[in-house]
Amino acid sequence: MSFTEHLIIGGGISGCTMAKHLSKYQRDFKLLEAQSNLGGRIQSTEQGLDLGPTWYWPHQHGVKTLLNELQLSSFDQYTQGDYVYQQAANAAINRGRDQQGMLSHRVSGGMGAIIDALTKTFPAENILLNSPVVNISKQNDLWHVNLITGETLTCEKLWLALPPRKVASLLKESSVSPALLAHLQSQQTWMSAQAKFVAVYDKAFWREAGLSGQGFSRVGPMVEINDASGFNANSSPAALFGFIGVPATHRQLIDEQQMINACVEQLGKLFGEAALNPISTHYIDWAANEFIASPADIAEPSQHAHFDLARFKAELNRLNLGLIGSEFSQTEPGYIAGAIDHVNNHSKSL
Ligand SMILES: Cc1cc2nc3c(=O)[nH]c(=O)nc-3n(C[C@H](O)[C@H](O)[C@H](O)COP(=O)(O)OP(=O)(O)OC[C@H]3O[C@@H](n4cnc5c(N)ncnc54)[C@H](O)[C@@H]3O)c2cc1C
Protein backbone atom coordinates (compact mmCIF):
# COMPACT_ATOMS: atom_id res chain seq x y z
CA MET A 1 0.00 0.00 0.00
CA SER A 2 1.62 3.28 -1.05
CA PHE A 3 0.82 6.76 0.29
CA THR A 4 0.73 10.08 -1.55
CA GLU A 5 -0.37 13.48 -0.23
CA HIS A 6 -2.63 14.25 -3.21
CA LEU A 7 -4.26 11.68 -5.48
CA ILE A 8 -6.13 12.59 -8.67
CA ILE A 9 -8.48 10.05 -10.26
CA GLY A 10 -9.24 10.76 -13.93
CA GLY A 11 -6.88 12.05 -16.61
CA GLY A 12 -9.18 14.23 -18.74
CA ILE A 13 -8.63 17.98 -18.97
CA SER A 14 -9.76 18.44 -15.34
CA GLY A 15 -7.32 15.90 -13.92
CA CYS A 16 -4.46 17.07 -16.15
CA THR A 17 -5.04 20.73 -15.23
CA MET A 18 -4.98 19.82 -11.53
CA ALA A 19 -1.75 17.84 -12.12
CA LYS A 20 -0.25 21.00 -13.68
CA HIS A 21 -1.10 23.04 -10.56
CA LEU A 22 0.14 20.38 -8.11
CA SER A 23 3.37 20.09 -10.05
CA LYS A 24 3.83 23.86 -10.06
CA TYR A 25 3.44 23.94 -6.24
CA GLN A 26 5.78 20.92 -5.97
CA ARG A 27 3.18 18.81 -4.18
CA ASP A 28 3.49 15.06 -3.74
CA PHE A 29 0.86 13.62 -6.10
CA LYS A 30 -0.17 10.78 -8.39
CA LEU A 31 -2.81 10.67 -11.15
CA LEU A 32 -4.70 7.45 -11.91
CA GLU A 33 -6.28 7.04 -15.34
CA ALA A 34 -8.35 3.99 -16.30
CA GLN A 35 -7.64 4.12 -20.04
CA SER A 36 -4.41 3.75 -21.99
CA ASN A 37 -4.18 7.48 -22.75
CA LEU A 38 -4.86 10.82 -21.10
CA GLY A 39 -7.56 13.17 -22.41
CA GLY A 40 -10.85 11.52 -21.43
CA ARG A 41 -13.54 13.07 -23.63
CA ILE A 42 -10.82 15.02 -25.47
CA GLN A 43 -9.57 12.86 -28.30
CA SER A 44 -7.96 14.04 -31.55
CA THR A 45 -6.55 12.01 -34.43
CA GLU A 46 -2.88 12.27 -35.42
CA GLN A 47 -3.98 14.84 -38.00
CA GLY A 48 -5.59 16.93 -35.26
CA LEU A 49 -9.20 16.06 -36.09
CA ASP A 50 -11.43 16.22 -33.03
CA LEU A 51 -13.46 13.14 -32.13
CA GLY A 52 -14.64 14.67 -28.85
CA PRO A 53 -14.99 18.41 -28.18
CA THR A 54 -14.34 20.78 -31.08
CA TRP A 55 -15.08 24.34 -29.96
CA TYR A 56 -14.66 26.98 -27.34
CA TRP A 57 -16.42 30.32 -27.47
CA PRO A 58 -15.23 33.97 -27.30
CA HIS A 59 -16.54 34.61 -23.75
CA GLN A 60 -14.62 31.62 -22.34
CA HIS A 61 -11.54 33.55 -21.26
CA GLY A 62 -10.17 30.71 -19.09
CA VAL A 63 -9.64 28.59 -22.21
CA LYS A 64 -7.81 31.41 -24.00
CA THR A 65 -5.61 32.02 -20.95
CA LEU A 66 -4.68 28.33 -20.76
CA LEU A 67 -3.94 28.21 -24.50
CA ASN A 68 -1.63 31.24 -24.13
CA GLU A 69 0.13 29.67 -21.16
CA LEU A 70 0.64 26.44 -23.14
CA GLN A 71 1.69 28.44 -26.23
CA LEU A 72 -1.12 27.02 -28.36
CA SER A 73 -2.98 28.94 -31.02
CA SER A 74 -6.58 28.89 -32.16
CA PHE A 75 -8.60 29.88 -35.21
CA ASP A 76 -12.23 30.59 -36.02
CA GLN A 77 -14.62 27.86 -37.12
CA TYR A 78 -15.07 28.09 -40.91
CA THR A 79 -18.62 29.30 -41.64
CA GLN A 80 -18.26 31.20 -44.92
CA GLY A 81 -20.83 30.32 -47.57
CA ASP A 82 -24.18 28.56 -47.55
CA TYR A 83 -25.35 25.75 -45.33
CA VAL A 84 -27.31 22.81 -46.75
CA TYR A 85 -30.49 21.41 -45.27
CA GLN A 86 -32.57 18.29 -45.84
CA GLN A 87 -36.11 18.34 -44.43
CA ALA A 88 -37.31 14.84 -45.39
CA ALA A 89 -36.05 11.68 -47.11
CA ASN A 90 -37.48 12.55 -50.53
CA ALA A 91 -37.10 16.31 -50.21
CA ALA A 92 -34.58 18.30 -52.27
CA ILE A 93 -31.46 19.68 -50.58
CA ASN A 94 -31.95 23.36 -49.75
CA ARG A 95 -29.24 25.99 -49.39
CA GLY A 96 -29.38 28.91 -46.99
CA ARG A 97 -27.15 31.57 -45.45
CA ASP A 98 -26.77 31.92 -41.68
CA GLN A 99 -26.74 35.70 -41.08
CA GLN A 100 -26.07 35.59 -37.32
CA GLY A 101 -23.78 32.60 -36.98
CA MET A 102 -22.28 32.27 -33.51
CA LEU A 103 -18.52 32.70 -33.58
CA SER A 104 -16.71 29.67 -32.21
CA HIS A 105 -13.00 28.91 -31.97
CA ARG A 106 -10.97 25.78 -32.60
CA VAL A 107 -7.55 24.82 -31.29
CA SER A 108 -4.75 24.45 -33.86
CA GLY A 109 -3.75 20.79 -33.94
CA GLY A 110 -7.06 19.83 -32.32
CA MET A 111 -8.17 19.81 -28.69
CA GLY A 112 -5.73 16.95 -28.10
CA ALA A 113 -2.94 19.54 -28.40
CA ILE A 114 -4.08 20.92 -25.01
CA ILE A 115 -3.63 17.50 -23.39
CA ASP A 116 -0.24 16.99 -25.11
CA ALA A 117 0.94 20.38 -23.85
CA LEU A 118 -0.44 19.81 -20.33
CA THR A 119 1.47 16.51 -20.04
CA LYS A 120 4.70 18.49 -20.44
CA THR A 121 3.88 20.46 -17.26
CA PHE A 122 4.08 17.49 -14.84
CA PRO A 123 6.42 14.49 -14.43
CA ALA A 124 5.42 11.41 -16.46
CA GLU A 125 6.27 9.13 -13.53
CA ASN A 126 3.37 10.68 -11.53
CA ILE A 127 0.86 9.29 -14.04
CA LEU A 128 -0.47 5.73 -13.89
CA LEU A 129 -2.34 4.76 -17.08
CA ASN A 130 -4.44 1.59 -17.48
CA SER A 131 -5.33 1.91 -13.79
CA PRO A 132 -9.10 1.71 -13.28
CA VAL A 133 -10.15 2.49 -9.72
CA VAL A 134 -12.84 0.11 -8.46
CA ASN A 135 -13.53 1.37 -4.94
CA ILE A 136 -12.87 4.39 -2.72
CA SER A 137 -13.36 4.57 1.04
CA LYS A 138 -12.37 6.85 3.90
CA GLN A 139 -10.67 5.07 6.82
CA ASN A 140 -8.95 6.75 9.79
CA ASP A 141 -8.66 10.15 8.10
CA LEU A 142 -7.08 8.67 4.97
CA TRP A 143 -8.65 7.86 1.61
CA HIS A 144 -8.13 4.26 0.49
CA VAL A 145 -8.27 3.80 -3.28
CA ASN A 146 -8.49 0.26 -4.67
CA LEU A 147 -7.33 -0.43 -8.21
CA ILE A 148 -8.56 -3.22 -10.46
CA THR A 149 -5.06 -4.75 -10.14
CA GLY A 150 -5.68 -5.36 -6.42
CA GLU A 151 -3.25 -2.59 -5.44
CA THR A 152 -4.35 0.00 -2.83
CA LEU A 153 -3.18 3.62 -2.69
CA THR A 154 -3.82 5.92 0.26
CA CYS A 155 -3.87 9.71 0.28
CA GLU A 156 -4.82 12.72 2.38
CA LYS A 157 -6.49 14.81 -0.33
CA LEU A 158 -8.50 13.07 -3.02
CA TRP A 159 -9.35 14.86 -6.28
CA LEU A 160 -12.06 13.15 -8.33
CA ALA A 161 -11.76 14.42 -11.91
CA LEU A 162 -14.61 12.20 -13.10
CA PRO A 163 -18.20 12.57 -14.30
CA PRO A 164 -20.56 12.66 -11.26
CA ARG A 165 -22.14 9.27 -11.95
CA LYS A 166 -18.68 7.69 -12.12
CA VAL A 167 -17.90 9.32 -8.75
CA ALA A 168 -21.14 7.86 -7.33
CA SER A 169 -20.27 4.37 -8.56
CA LEU A 170 -16.94 4.47 -6.69
CA LEU A 171 -17.96 6.08 -3.39
CA LYS A 172 -19.74 4.09 -0.72
CA GLU A 173 -22.51 5.36 1.59
CA SER A 174 -20.24 4.66 4.55
CA SER A 175 -17.91 7.44 3.32
CA VAL A 176 -20.32 10.12 2.10
CA SER A 177 -23.86 11.17 3.02
CA PRO A 178 -26.83 9.53 1.26
CA ALA A 179 -27.87 13.02 0.11
CA LEU A 180 -24.53 13.62 -1.66
CA LEU A 181 -24.61 10.17 -3.23
CA ALA A 182 -28.16 10.73 -4.54
CA HIS A 183 -27.22 14.17 -5.89
CA LEU A 184 -24.21 12.71 -7.71
CA GLN A 185 -26.39 10.02 -9.28
CA SER A 186 -28.78 12.66 -10.61
CA GLN A 187 -26.11 14.61 -12.57
CA GLN A 188 -25.76 13.81 -16.27
CA THR A 189 -22.43 13.60 -18.13
CA TRP A 190 -22.53 16.20 -20.89
CA MET A 191 -22.36 14.79 -24.46
CA SER A 192 -21.54 11.30 -23.22
CA ALA A 193 -24.45 9.76 -25.17
CA GLN A 194 -23.17 11.28 -28.45
CA ALA A 195 -21.39 9.73 -31.43
CA LYS A 196 -19.32 11.59 -34.03
CA PHE A 197 -18.30 10.87 -37.61
CA VAL A 198 -15.39 12.51 -39.45
CA ALA A 199 -14.64 12.22 -43.18
CA VAL A 200 -11.23 13.36 -44.50
CA TYR A 201 -10.82 14.60 -48.11
CA ASP A 202 -7.91 15.64 -50.31
CA LYS A 203 -9.39 19.15 -50.58
CA ALA A 204 -12.27 21.18 -49.13
CA PHE A 205 -14.35 20.90 -52.33
CA TRP A 206 -17.48 22.27 -50.62
CA ARG A 207 -15.74 25.61 -50.06
CA GLU A 208 -15.08 25.89 -53.81
CA ALA A 209 -18.83 25.40 -54.32
CA GLY A 210 -19.64 28.29 -51.97
CA LEU A 211 -20.66 26.00 -49.11
CA SER A 212 -19.61 26.43 -45.51
CA GLY A 213 -19.56 22.70 -44.81
CA GLN A 214 -22.45 23.20 -42.43
CA GLY A 215 -25.38 20.86 -42.91
CA PHE A 216 -28.59 20.09 -41.07
CA SER A 217 -30.75 17.05 -41.62
CA ARG A 218 -34.01 15.61 -40.39
CA VAL A 219 -33.16 12.41 -42.24
CA GLY A 220 -29.85 11.37 -40.72
CA PRO A 221 -27.89 9.50 -39.66
CA MET A 222 -26.11 12.82 -38.96
CA VAL A 223 -28.26 15.71 -37.73
CA GLU A 224 -25.63 18.47 -37.79
CA ILE A 225 -22.49 18.66 -39.91
CA ASN A 226 -19.62 21.17 -39.83
CA ASP A 227 -16.34 21.88 -41.55
CA ALA A 228 -13.62 20.12 -39.53
CA SER A 229 -10.64 21.21 -41.64
CA GLY A 230 -7.47 22.54 -40.07
CA PHE A 231 -6.63 26.27 -40.09
CA ASN A 232 -5.37 26.12 -43.64
CA ALA A 233 -7.47 23.52 -45.46
CA ASN A 234 -4.94 23.47 -48.32
CA SER A 235 -2.00 22.37 -46.20
CA SER A 236 -3.76 20.60 -43.30
CA PRO A 237 -6.54 18.01 -43.47
CA ALA A 238 -9.74 18.98 -45.26
CA ALA A 239 -12.60 17.35 -43.40
CA LEU A 240 -16.27 17.37 -42.45
CA PHE A 241 -17.66 16.10 -39.16
CA GLY A 242 -21.17 15.29 -38.02
CA PHE A 243 -23.10 14.48 -34.86
CA ILE A 244 -25.05 11.24 -35.20
CA GLY A 245 -28.76 11.64 -34.50
CA VAL A 246 -29.49 7.95 -34.03
CA PRO A 247 -30.09 7.40 -30.26
CA ALA A 248 -27.37 5.48 -28.39
CA THR A 249 -29.64 2.51 -27.64
CA HIS A 250 -30.38 2.09 -31.40
CA ARG A 251 -26.73 2.57 -32.35
CA GLN A 252 -25.79 -0.47 -30.28
CA LEU A 253 -27.81 -2.58 -32.75
CA ILE A 254 -26.12 -1.17 -35.86
CA ASP A 255 -22.88 -2.51 -37.29
CA GLU A 256 -20.16 0.19 -37.25
CA GLN A 257 -19.33 -0.21 -40.96
CA GLN A 258 -23.03 0.16 -41.81
CA MET A 259 -23.11 3.44 -39.88
CA ILE A 260 -19.96 4.70 -41.63
CA ASN A 261 -21.40 3.80 -45.05
CA ALA A 262 -24.67 5.58 -44.24
CA CYS A 263 -22.77 8.72 -43.13
CA VAL A 264 -20.70 8.83 -46.35
CA GLU A 265 -23.85 8.34 -48.41
CA GLN A 266 -25.53 11.20 -46.55
CA LEU A 267 -22.54 13.50 -47.18
CA GLY A 268 -22.82 12.63 -50.87
CA LYS A 269 -26.47 13.67 -50.90
CA LEU A 270 -25.83 16.93 -49.06
CA PHE A 271 -22.51 18.06 -50.56
CA GLY A 272 -22.36 16.28 -53.92
CA GLU A 273 -20.53 13.36 -55.49
CA ALA A 274 -17.06 14.41 -54.34
CA ALA A 275 -18.14 13.67 -50.78
CA LEU A 276 -18.61 9.99 -51.62
CA ASN A 277 -14.85 9.37 -51.76
CA PRO A 278 -13.21 10.31 -48.47
CA ILE A 279 -9.51 9.45 -48.02
CA SER A 280 -10.32 8.15 -44.55
CA THR A 281 -13.12 8.17 -41.99
CA HIS A 282 -13.35 8.11 -38.20
CA TYR A 283 -16.33 7.05 -36.11
CA ILE A 284 -16.54 7.24 -32.33
CA ASP A 285 -19.44 6.27 -30.09
CA TRP A 286 -18.92 7.90 -26.70
CA ALA A 287 -21.88 6.04 -25.20
CA ALA A 288 -19.87 2.83 -25.57
CA ASN A 289 -17.06 4.13 -23.34
CA GLU A 290 -17.62 2.60 -19.90
CA PHE A 291 -15.31 5.17 -18.26
CA ILE A 292 -17.27 8.15 -19.57
CA ALA A 293 -20.96 7.28 -20.05
CA SER A 294 -23.28 5.68 -17.49
CA PRO A 295 -26.49 3.79 -18.36
CA ALA A 296 -28.60 6.69 -17.02
CA ASP A 297 -26.76 9.16 -19.32
CA ILE A 298 -27.78 7.09 -22.33
CA ALA A 299 -31.39 6.66 -21.22
CA GLU A 300 -32.16 10.36 -20.58
CA PRO A 301 -32.65 13.32 -22.91
CA SER A 302 -29.45 15.40 -23.05
CA GLN A 303 -29.07 18.04 -20.34
CA HIS A 304 -26.36 19.90 -18.42
CA ALA A 305 -25.39 19.01 -14.87
CA HIS A 306 -26.25 21.45 -12.04
CA PHE A 307 -24.18 20.32 -9.09
CA ASP A 308 -25.17 22.20 -5.92
CA LEU A 309 -21.70 22.86 -4.52
CA ALA A 310 -22.92 25.24 -1.80
CA ARG A 311 -25.12 22.49 -0.33
CA PHE A 312 -22.26 19.99 -0.01
CA LYS A 313 -19.25 22.28 0.51
CA ALA A 314 -18.95 21.64 4.27
CA GLU A 315 -19.15 17.85 3.81
CA LEU A 316 -16.55 17.89 1.02
CA ASN A 317 -14.17 20.07 3.08
CA ARG A 318 -14.55 17.80 6.10
CA LEU A 319 -13.80 14.75 3.93
CA ASN A 320 -10.79 16.38 2.19
CA LEU A 321 -12.48 15.56 -1.09
CA GLY A 322 -12.36 17.70 -4.25
CA LEU A 323 -14.89 17.06 -7.01
CA ILE A 324 -13.21 18.63 -10.03
CA GLY A 325 -14.72 17.08 -13.17
CA SER A 326 -16.22 19.53 -15.63
CA GLU A 327 -19.80 18.72 -14.51
CA PHE A 328 -19.03 20.07 -11.01
CA SER A 329 -18.20 23.54 -12.30
CA GLN A 330 -20.54 26.30 -11.12
CA THR A 331 -20.00 28.12 -14.43
CA GLU A 332 -20.43 26.32 -17.76
CA PRO A 333 -20.73 22.78 -16.37
CA GLY A 334 -19.92 20.12 -18.94
CA TYR A 335 -17.75 22.41 -21.07
CA ILE A 336 -13.97 22.54 -21.30
CA ALA A 337 -14.18 26.13 -20.04
CA GLY A 338 -16.10 24.92 -16.97
CA ALA A 339 -13.45 22.27 -16.29
CA ILE A 340 -10.57 24.76 -16.50
CA ASP A 341 -12.26 27.48 -14.39
CA HIS A 342 -13.37 25.01 -11.71
CA VAL A 343 -9.91 23.44 -11.31
CA ASN A 344 -8.25 26.87 -11.29
CA ASN A 345 -10.58 27.92 -8.44
CA HIS A 346 -9.66 24.80 -6.46
CA SER A 347 -5.95 25.39 -7.06
CA LYS A 348 -6.16 28.61 -4.99
CA SER A 349 -6.45 26.45 -1.87
CA LEU A 350 -3.24 24.47 -2.56
C1 LIG B 1 -18.71 14.36 -28.65
C2 LIG B 1 -18.42 15.45 -27.65
C3 LIG B 1 -18.41 16.77 -28.05
C4 LIG B 1 -18.14 17.80 -27.13
N1 LIG B 1 -18.06 19.07 -27.58
C5 LIG B 1 -17.63 20.05 -26.75
C6 LIG B 1 -17.29 21.33 -27.25
O1 LIG B 1 -17.35 21.57 -28.47
N2 LIG B 1 -16.87 22.27 -26.36
C7 LIG B 1 -16.75 22.02 -25.02
O2 LIG B 1 -16.37 22.93 -24.26
N3 LIG B 1 -17.03 20.79 -24.52
C8 LIG B 1 -17.45 19.81 -25.34
N4 LIG B 1 -17.64 18.53 -24.86
C9 LIG B 1 -17.51 18.30 -23.42
C10 LIG B 1 -16.01 18.20 -22.98
O3 LIG B 1 -15.41 17.18 -23.71
C11 LIG B 1 -15.93 17.90 -21.47
O4 LIG B 1 -16.49 18.97 -20.74
C12 LIG B 1 -14.52 17.73 -20.94
O5 LIG B 1 -13.67 17.10 -21.85
C13 LIG B 1 -14.61 16.95 -19.63
O6 LIG B 1 -13.32 16.80 -19.07
P1 LIG B 1 -13.14 16.09 -17.65
O7 LIG B 1 -11.69 15.96 -17.42
O8 LIG B 1 -13.93 16.82 -16.61
O9 LIG B 1 -13.84 14.66 -17.79
P2 LIG B 1 -13.49 13.46 -18.78
O10 LIG B 1 -12.89 13.96 -20.00
O11 LIG B 1 -14.73 12.64 -18.87
O12 LIG B 1 -12.36 12.66 -18.00
C14 LIG B 1 -12.65 11.71 -17.02
C15 LIG B 1 -11.50 10.70 -17.01
O13 LIG B 1 -11.69 9.81 -15.91
C16 LIG B 1 -11.31 8.51 -16.33
N5 LIG B 1 -11.98 7.53 -15.46
C17 LIG B 1 -13.31 7.22 -15.42
N6 LIG B 1 -13.53 6.26 -14.50
C18 LIG B 1 -12.33 5.95 -13.96
C19 LIG B 1 -11.91 5.03 -12.96
N7 LIG B 1 -12.77 4.21 -12.34
N8 LIG B 1 -10.59 4.97 -12.63
C20 LIG B 1 -9.68 5.79 -13.23
N9 LIG B 1 -10.04 6.69 -14.20
C21 LIG B 1 -11.35 6.77 -14.56
C22 LIG B 1 -11.81 8.44 -17.77
O14 LIG B 1 -11.15 7.41 -18.48
C23 LIG B 1 -11.46 9.83 -18.27
O15 LIG B 1 -10.16 9.88 -18.82
C24 LIG B 1 -17.90 17.48 -25.75
C25 LIG B 1 -17.89 16.14 -25.35
C26 LIG B 1 -18.14 15.13 -26.28
C27 LIG B 1 -18.10 13.69 -25.82
Image (spheres, rainbow, N blue to C red):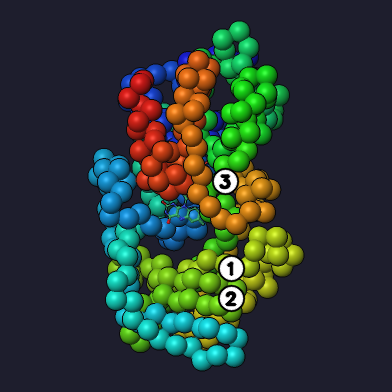
Q: Is residue 19 above or below residue 51?
A: above
Q: Is mark 3 within 8 Å of ligand 1?
A: no
Badge 3 density bin: few <14, some 14–19, many ≥20, Cα 10 Å: many
Mark 3 or mark 2, which is nearer the start of the sequence? 3
Mark 3 or mark 1, which is nearer the start of the sequence? 3
Q: Could you tell me residue 142's position as x and y percent?
A: 57, 12
Q: Is residue 340 left or right of residue 137?
A: left
Q: Tell me the element at label 3.
A: loop
Report which residue position mark 3 lands on: 188
Numbered circles on residues, count: 3
- Name the residue rendered at 44%, 88% in the picture: 94
Instruction: Choose top left, top right, bottom left or bottom right for residue 255.
Output: bottom right
Q: Tell me which amino acid carries mark 3.
A: Gln
Mark nearer the viewer, 2 or 3: 3
- Between residue 331 and residue 84, name the one nearer to us: 331
Give the alpha-carbon distance from disc 1 to disc 3, as whole Å: 19 Å
Residue extending furthest toward the right: 253
Can I make out residue 279 in this image? no
- Name the residue rendered at 57%, 67% in the picture: 244
Q: Tell me which amino acid carries mark 2.
A: Gly
Asked whether the residues under the numbered discs 2 and 1 touch, taking CB atoms below 8 Å apart as contact, a structural biologist would say yes
Report which residue position mark 1 lands on: 245
Q: Could you tell me residue 166's position as x and y percent?
A: 61, 37
Q: Could you tell me residue 121's position as x and y percent?
A: 35, 33
Report which residue position mark 2 lands on: 220
Q: Tell me the element at label 2.
A: loop
- Name the residue rendered at 51%, 44% in the picture: 305
Mark nearer the viewer, 1 or 3: 3
Asked whether the residues under the numbered discs 1 and 3 touch, taking CB atoms below 8 Å apart as contact, a structural biologist would say no
Can I make out residue 68 in this image? yes
Q: Is mark 1 within 8 Å of ligand 1?
A: no
Q: Could you tell me residue 273's position as x and y percent?
A: 50, 88
